[in-house]
Amino acid sequence: MSSSTPTSEPVRLLVCDDHVVVRAGLLALLASASGIEVIGEAGTGEEAVALAAKLAPDVVLMDLQLGPGIDGVEATRRIAAGERGAEGGDNGSGASAGAGEGGGGGGAPRVLVLTTYDTDADITRAIEAGATGYLLKAERPEELFAAIHAAAQGRTALSPPVASRVMAQMREPRPTLTARELDILKQLAQGMGNREIARTLFISEATVKTHLGRIYDKLGVDTRAGAVAVAKERRLLP
Amino acid sequence: MSSSTPTSEPVRLLVCDDHVVVRAGLLALLASASGIEVIGEAGTGEEAVALAAKLAPDVVLMDLQLGPGIDGVEATRRIAAGERGAEGGDNGSGASAGAGEGGGGGGAPRVLVLTTYDTDADITRAIEAGATGYLLKAERPEELFAAIHAAAQGRTALSPPVASRVMAQMREPRPTLTARELDILKQLAQGMGNREIARTLFISEATVKTHLGRIYDKLGVDTRAGAVAVAKERRLLP
DNA sequence: ACCCGGATCAACCGATCGGTTGACATGGCC
DNA sequence: GGCCATGTCAACCGATCGGTTGATCCGGGT
């Protein structure tokens, strides 16, 4: 679709990973790949957003786990939306998927997620944020190279395990926790009692219990300890 | 102490990381370092132990998070102890640290841990297992090179954040959970009630409560949900 | 206009948990 | 042979949790 992109011009790539060693390793590795030119590297999400705006790369290789500051998902959202480097007052929560598509075509770089975990929550959030592909670091380098080229053309590239999970999710839509339920869950994971949670969130204890009941249902557990375990497992919590 | 090792001969290195991309990146990166020769790479703990026995490298660069099979700590323990590649019927649990020292000196490779997390539990376990150094992937490549050379000479190399934690730990010895308490904690994290835990471990409900009380003390919490949260936080559980 | 999902609150009850105290057996250490 | 840590068990009590039912309010979609 995107026209042009004759195989003669190399893909202009921006690498974002908070681990210096990994970043340097990727650079060294990518140097051996043909048709790929690394034009910049970032160690934080903010840096990635700023550099993406400044350098206008074809593809951004993005790790989801970035130390402090905005996480990879948020960085992905901003880059895919073609946002400028300056910070906007936008709050990350809310629903509001739908980013990704419009973009404008020309400007917004494609974001290719390259990360360690293939958790449902991570995959879902990354895709909703507008990621063009989702690769695992356990993938073979050739696959990575191929995925970068694919992403440059706007084609989707998913690691096999990721693809499986996406399909499974399509077949059996997973119960999604509402924002409010996540609030309760967060407090719960601090070991707080219902009364404390209620006070913290300015609601009644009864409401907390109601939410908890729904959380139990959705997570398939029936105790608070179990809920915390599942939540940590699925990385629903920081 | 170890004599010899004139600066003329390069350090013979074995790299172990379950992520192919990271491994390839490290290889590419290390190719630019002087005095370091990568003589092998492993993608699992078992592979690392076998290759260490077979190739007798000077240093093993070890990630702690390895997919399935034995983890990095166990691999470190076996390599540092000079164990042969064949699998022994040994169970990993039990106490029995004390490996590390004896070793035999000449044969056992030095293990340099290179990982993402600087959790207290990880650091402690790695050091107890006989690791010569502990670096973070966020470290600068030059530090990595220096650490490898240091490790080859038996000198300890720690990333600054790791060193800080080690010192802090020396000053204020952490409460260590006993093996039994970890058993209870494991069940707890499954969301099980006291009665279920008691039945599973073939003890009385009263005993479970006693253990739980001690666990609360040691983890600094006072509810089961809190205990699970802290346990997951400190990676005391899988 | 209607209905539905989400969020809020209430009251109730039995079961479980959290905390305490006290006790006994085992094993290693001095 | 004592001493201490660890693991085991018991009984008790108040507080909390888990589960249920029912209700109100609001915003969105058909």
Image (tube, coloured by chain):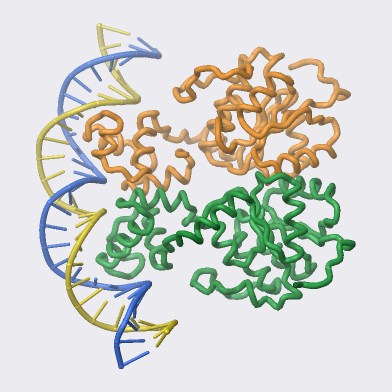
Chain colours: A orange, B green, C yellow, D blue
Q: Is residue B86 left or right of residue C7?
A: right
The image position of residue A27, as x and y in percent, is 78, 38
Q: Is residue B82 left or right of residue B166?
A: right
The residue that appears at 85% across and 52% down in the rendered structure is B34
Front in this rendered view, residue A38 or B165: B165
Picture quadrant where residue C30 is located: bottom left
The residue that appears at 25% across and 66% down in the rendered structure is B206
Front in this rendered view, residue B171 or D12: B171
For the N terminus of chain A, the quadrant is top right
The image position of residue A2, as x and y in percent, is 75, 16
View extreme (front): residue: B171
Picture quadrant where residue B72 is located: bottom right
A187 in relation to B131, above or below: above
Q: Is residue A3 left or right of residue A89?
A: right
A29 in relation to B220, above or below: above
The residue that appears at 37% across and 48% down in the rendered structure is A226
Picture quadrant where residue B71 is located: bottom right
The residue that appears at 83% across and 50% down in the rendered structure is B33
The image position of residue A30, as x and y in percent, is 80, 37
Task: For residue B9, say whether it is visible.
Answer: yes
